[in-house]
Amino acid sequence: MSVIRIPSPRSVIDRRALVLAIDKLVDESGHTKARRAIVDVLRGALDSGRAEIAERLTSKPSAGHDVAEAQAFLVDQLMRVIHDHVVDNVYPVSNRSRGERLTIMAVGGYGRGEMAPHSDVDIAFLTPIKQTPWCEQVIEAMLYFLWDLGLKIGHSSRSLDEMVKMSRSDLTIRTAMLEGRYVWGDQDLYEEARQRFWSDVVSGTERQFVVEKLAEREERHKRMGDSRYVVEPNVKEGKGSLRDLHTLYWIGKYIHKVRDPSELVQVGLLTSKEYKAFRRAENFFWAVRCHLHTITKRAEDRLTFDMQREVAARMNYADRPGKSAVERFMHFFFLQAKVVGNLTGVFLAQLDEQFARKQPRGLLAGFRAKPRTLKGYKVFGGRIKAPSDDWFESDPVRMLEIFVLADKEGLEIHPETMRLISRDAVLIKGDVRRDKRANELFMELLTSRNNPEISLRAFNEAGVFGRFVTEFGRVNAQMQFDMYHHYTVDEHTIRAIGLLSRVEKGELKNDHPLAHDIVHKVRSRRALYASVLLHDIAKGRGGDHSVLGAEIALKLCPRFGLDEDETELVSWLVRQHLLLSATAFKRDLSDAKTITDFVQVVQSLDRLRQLTMLTIVDIRAVGPGTWNSWKRQLIGELYAATEERLRLGHAEFGREKRIAAKKAAVEALEPANAALIEKVGAKFVDSYWIAESEDVIAKNLAQLEAAEALGHALSIHTEYYQAHGATLVTVIASDHPGLFYRIAGGIHLAGGNIIDARIHTTRTGRAVDNFLVQDPLGRPFMEESQLERLRTSIENALANRIKILPQLVAKPDARPRADAFEVRPRVIFDNKASNRFTVVEVNARDRPALLNRLAHALFESKLMVYSAHVATYGERAADTFYVTDLLGEKLTATSRLKALERRLLDAASERTVEEVAA
């Protein structure tokens, strides 16, 4: 396509008027003196053209192609004007030689005739032979004009021979030249270059190009997160994005020499319906990309959280009950990415077919696998194929059967058959959903012992999953607008099922030893798989998704063929699927009441195992880095304590027996610990021995003894604590009000995040406080310099050498993207969760000063903090404190609780932070 045609071209740029203006300036002052004025005229044309294109985008916010083509048209016209000015006015030659010829080609995206407002301008200057001085001067002069306009230019200057040589050796150059389009200059030279490219570069390398291009695509996908459903997608480079569509076009163009994507239909790589889907997805992605460039005024292709809101508003998405505008916009985005995935699948498989047909039938042809029949289907070359066009129409249940057969036999579904399934998926209606055989097939696929993740993803992308389980169809491509969830709901669910299957096969023994140990002990694996499938099924319905999901489970499970007990179990698991993680991460596991309350809800060993399995795969499937050794430790502790209580009934060890057992465990670590227990053990109160693990107790005893022997009023110990994937910080000091918030401030100033804190006071009035610390990305401090920085910072905070709060507020947020989210602070009081303490939970937006400010508010409220537990979910933090008043009593007075709530909400609010900073 050499000429870009757009509506009302002169309102974007009037080339004739521009040429006249430049000629007038040259006539008046000569080209040298007029240069600055000429650049100003060109810049004015560029700015007004961009403004017109931006206006077109505003008035038609979904017209991606129109805007991308208008941008390329604008650059084309400027390029032509600049070329003519340089050739006619700057370096005029009356009688050029054969070597003094020059053609300008647009390559890359610009060559395709599509550009976002701030895309790079990729151009190739081609000459017939090695460059002459005149060609060099013209190219250099043109480039200086383009640079003066502020355009980002990607350029090459080559002779035809050099172009052929470079294209042969470099895949990137070859792909750019594949998109080559004549812009201006010597047209005969362009035609010669085009013919040489096809005859000298492309011919005979088709198969190699496809292989290299697909390898490049795989590498790019891995780099960008290897999923179409990452919540901050890259609209240009991500999986299921523009680049994937372009790859299809490049391959089609390289093999079949198509000039336009529409010709992919004629050469049999896409159907006309698929081509329409190709154009729709491409148009939508171009619109999004153009909005991103217009908003940021730069080449920005990442759809970050803050951009998502703005692009959704510009594209006229509105809030709906249960779904915000941004969630609706991103839902449509992911649906388009899914379309691209489907198109890629059928396109590549079709291509494979075409290549296979061209294979020579040589000597070994007879040894090839022979076609066979499997339950009426044709199987050949590792693929399963429907025998006729009306195969699924005559029995829609076959649309489930084929996926089960493919999974069992390790086969791919033939692209033609995938097309039939996508076409006929609409035939899956109520009668098919109620069909006993269909539901048996579905459960077989869900609980497959092979690879249910791959099978279910194909099942989903073919459009059958959402038709057969309509509730799952509602969460298809649905994202959650937060920083915690990395994937859409359907992708998260399918990944969780895949993880469960891998645990069951023993593949994740090292990562998940507890899950590995209990997965084969559950009574019903069907119930376990069904609970993973349904745990988030009610997301986006505008209520508590656990409660609504439990109701959906009661309806769906009998249909799937689960019995009454299994149905009740699945419903309970969906209802309680957040209970175990909330208890483990936000409650004090050393408090006997925590375990008692949890046991009361769980009630049986099988439920505990099922819930633990569901919790582990749910957290791990949230995204990379969400699962860590600290979470593994906490879940393991809660599981062990609950299992013990369920096995022994209520026969909890007596307090004295538990303390004696803990002391024996400390002694067992190292014989020298017996003397330490004898010497300083009596100074610790009973609750200390129950709360801390034996290895931490051993460290604390040694530190306290050393501090007393040396007469140190303050002792700070820091070490990498591998078992918890964190850094253990122990501070021994004279106990006084405000100690906790000062230590917290010191840790935060050193760049640490407190994930757990246990606060103890000895019988002699010394505080022994244990903190578990990580950096903002969830990693422990391990280097000696980091550990030293922690010690120094805590010491300075306790000595009052630094003003903690202003410095904390001034610290940059380690995750500034959290600014895109509003988290309304909430305070929850619970006087039933512990027999001794009032449990205070504060939910707020996570930021560096938060824990310190909350601890300070508790100090100002004259409260004693006994333990603190910090859980973060993306941009949200849930900080839980076990507190009493100064007399050691719970807080019960309504007026006092109200006053504390106000103080904590003030501490958690953004407004107050800004005021403090001022």
Image (cartoon, helix red, strand yellow):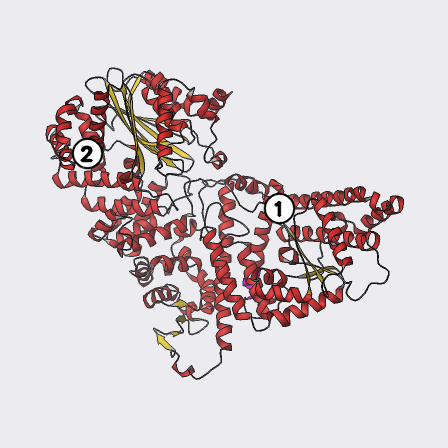
Name the foreground residue: 813 vs 794.
794
Quadrant in which residue 91 is drawn: bottom right
Q: Amino acid at mark 1?
A: Pro
Q: Nearer the viewer, mark 1 or mark 2?
A: 2
> Residue 469 at x, y = what percent?
38, 54
Indicate yes or no whether the magenta region holds residue 685.
no
Identify the residue under disc 2.
Answer: 694
Q: Which residues are magenta?
A: 271-276
Work out whether residue 658 or residue 279 is closer to the camera in this orientation and state it.
658
Name the residue located 78 percent from the left edge and 43 percent from the top edge.
Answer: 41
Left or right, 87 with reference to 258:
right
In this view, which residue lies farthest toward the right?
28
Mark yes or no: residue 431 visible.
Answer: no
Considering only vertical position in the picture, is 482 above or below 77? above
Q: Residues within 10 Å of mark 2 (few under 14, many from 20)?
A: many
Q: Quadrant of residue 875?
A: top left
Q: Mark 1 sits on what residue? A: 61
Residue drawn 40% across the image and 18% down it: 801
Q: Nearer the viewer, residue 143 or 187?
A: 143
